[in-house]
Image (cartoon, rainbow, N blue to C red):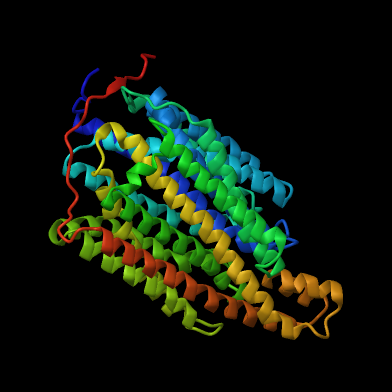
Amino acid sequence: MTTPPTLPKSRQQLILAVLLVSSLLIWLDNTILSTTFETLADPVRGLGADPAQLQWATGSYTLVFATLMFTAGALGDRFGHRTVLLAGMAIFGAASVWAAYASDASQLIAARAVMGAGSALIMPATMAILTWTFTGPARANAIGLFSASAGVGLAAGPLLAGVLLQHFWWGSVFLVNVPVVVLGLIGIGALVPNFRSPTPRPLDPAGLLLSISGLAALAYGLIRAGQVASWSRLDVWAPITAGLILLTAFVLVELRIRQPSFDPRLLAERTFGGGNAALGLLFFAMTAVGFYGAFYLQGARGFSALEAGLASSAAAIGVMIGGPLGVRLVRRWSLRPVAGTALVVAGLAMGSFGLFDLHTPIIWNEIVLLVQGLSIGMVISPVTAALMNTLPLERAGAGSAVTNTVRQTGSVLGIAVGGTIMSIAYRRGIEGSLSDIPGPVQDQARASAELARHVAGTISRPDLAHAADNAFIHAMHVGTVWTMLIALTGAAVLILTIRPDRKPTELEPEPVEILEPAAG
């Protein structure tokens, strides 16, 4: 057993660059998909996917991502985080090719689930390698750069998707992942040491089964509620109840294991638990408001994918600036006032979309997205740095797995609840305009605004398309109020759980074992 060596600064920077490529891949893919929603919903240019299928295209990814991450952390501790990172990149690349050539929505959902498995292997390994590569203030700076890389992905994803959708078929947005994967695999194999814990945690098949089945049942029930526009049906409340029971059993099982892969005890620590709860609520709100925004610009406002990507770039610029800025401000004024205030502002920015309509000048969209992105960046970077610094070094993999699992669980629930609220509100908004529409057309118009616009053009009923736009705006207004309340709840949790004088502190490295890359 040896202590981690102080690597040459040049190698540290190269390792950071490789890790940023891995992180960029995930952010790039997520933003590309959201820009593609409108095309995928089109029966002619895409797959004719309905809102529930689009929810699952995102939800299957985040579901697998959330529930496999704690297992990925244990695998990294056991076999080395570089090994796990390489496997994750390879799986992600292969699944991207599958998604690109999916022939229907079901295949796309399945491919996205496999991509989620690759991401689950990538994210905890990336954060663990970063934590062991850097110490002191350099670690907080490196985490700040991770938020900047998220901003680059947020900015590049929509723009890249817009260019690709303008010139190629929708599957091209997934093929763009392949060269990034190849570049990442080369860099990881050549530069990254294979850090691992000297006391690897055992694998946890029971916990894995309970968590993925519980979260899947919960998400299914929530999404099903949007399909049938009711919360009282058996096929809605039964899976929701089953999911909650299974997730409760998961926590109880993990508490009884001496070395759990997902350790709920970590959440009992005030800063770690409260910070993770706040981040989970933030990701819940971010995912929901992103789902509305994708359809607002391209569907209701009629922007092309490229124009929508350009319009969304303000949020990415905000995140890129907010991440490093938040880290610097926390050093001066501590975590609670900086991150708490930023999360309040982010929530209010999300809620302000409730004031938008079909004729709102686009400049207001840009201003709100810039403020929202800046605030989100100022929350994620310093809070993540504080959470990781509350843990001893040998628990970096477990802590990263917990943190990322909570975030992705928030994303799963955000897409499920946000999409369902929007679907129910849309159906209620469009119902009064369907009395003189033929029965089969009514069913399509109720399914989504995208299908309503399509059938309106088919049967030459522009009034139906107009009604669909108005119903969507009503649904967006309802959804953004809930989204704002969720984000503000996260701000309250953060302010209550972070001590007033809490600043990120650096821990001395604990003994670890290092597996250097094999020669040749």
Tell me where residue 201 appears, x and y as whole percent: 39, 27
Residue at 58% across / 79% down in the picture? Answer: 473
Numbered-mark total: 0
Front one among 99 and 355? 355
Query: Which quadrant would the N terminus be assigned to in this image?
Result: top left
Above or below 269: residue 329: below
Instruction: Measuring from the top left, give residue 266's x and y in whole percent.
Output: 33, 43
Decide which of 92, 200 is in the foreground and name it.
Answer: 200
Q: Quadrant of the C terminus?
A: top left
185 lies left or right of 339: right
Residue visible at 59% across and 54% down in the picture: 218
Q: For the point 73% across and 73% down, which residue is it?
A: 446
Q: Position of residue 341 (x, y in %)?
A: 27, 69
Tell me: residue 488, above or below residue 202: below
The image quarter containing residue 185 is: top left
Query: 479 above or below 10?
Result: below
| Image side of residue 198 versus residue 453, left or right | left
Q: Is residue 81 above or below residue 338?
A: above
Can you name the residue that lies furthest to the top here? 519
Q: Which residue is located at x 23 percent, y 59 percent? A: 325
Residue 100 occupies quadrant? top right
Residue 116 at least partly seen: yes
Q: Look at the image and tell me whether residue 162 can be seen.
A: no
Where is residue 134 drawn, in percent x and y? 23, 37
